[in-house]
Amino acid sequence: VLCGITPGPPNSKVLKTAVGSAEYVPHAHFGSTLDAVRDLQRQGVTVWACETTSKSQPMWNTEMPQPLALVFGNELVGVEADVLEQCDDLVCIPTHGVKNSLNVATCASVVMWEALRQWDSQNSAASS
């Protein structure tokens, strides 16, 4: 799901970066993140924001439901307050040191890896 000014296919830069895979990845574009979150929730998808807040749970202390959509904010201001309020839960990647965040690509990679790890583990246990 793409929101706001985020480019998607058929943008030439996106197509170049995708190296031929863009046609295999379904996508939708919404004018705002809040519209996208509400639409996903209407479809029965749980929506979590990845953001460092006082209400956020460390991602490894959570069981990630299926289906799950993850919201990642931009690197300057994070996820907008109205979007945080609409999301079903908030998770974070705890960090140490002065900076309390990772860049969005790194954050997305880590959180999606953890979701897939949990789901693969659940599927393996169910088939045993």
Image: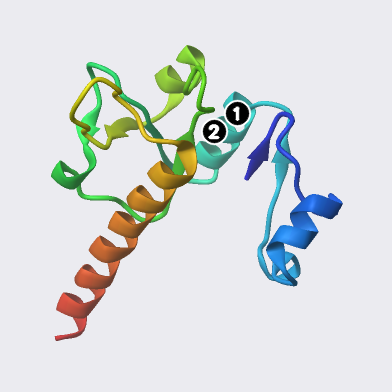
Contact, CB < 8 Å: mark 1 with mark 2?
yes
Q: Nearer the viewer, residue 53 or 123?
A: 53
How packed mark 1 is, by other alpha carbons closer than 10 Å (few <14, some 14-19, many 20 or more), is many
Residue at the outermost bottom position? 128
Q: Position of residue 13 (x, y in %)?
A: 79, 51
Number of numbered markers = 2
| Residue 45 seen | no
Q: Position of residue 93 (x, y in %)?
A: 26, 37
- The image shows residue 64, relative to residue 58, as above or below, that is below
Give the quarter of the image for residue 114: bottom left
How packed mark 2 is, by other alpha carbons closer than 10 Å (few <14, some 14-19, many 20 or more), is many
Q: In what quadrant of the picture does the N terminus appear?
A: top right
Query: Is 27 displayed left or right of 119 in the figure?
Result: right
Q: Residue at x 48, y 45 (%)?
A: 105
* Spatial separation of the CA atoms under disc 1 and disc 2: 6 Å
Q: What amino acid type should be assigned to the residue bearing mark 1?
A: Thr
Query: Is 108 displayed left or right of 12 in the figure?
Result: left
Q: Residue at x 67, y 26 (%)?
A: 32
Q: Label 2, secondary structure: give it.
A: helix
Q: Position of residue 67 (x, y in %)?
A: 41, 54
Query: Is 100 displayed left or right of 107 in the figure?
Result: left
The image's mark for residue 84 is none
Residue at the outermost front position? 98
Q: What amino acid type should be assigned to the residue bearing mark 2?
A: Val
Q: Position of residue 17 (x, y in %)?
A: 71, 59
The image's mark for residue 33 is 1
Q: In what quadrant of the picture does the C terminus appear?
A: bottom left
Q: Return the residue at label 2.
A: 37
Q: Label 1, secondary structure: give it.
A: helix
Q: Residue at x 44, y 36 (%)?
A: 103
Query: Is 88 displayed left or right of 92 in the figure?
Result: right
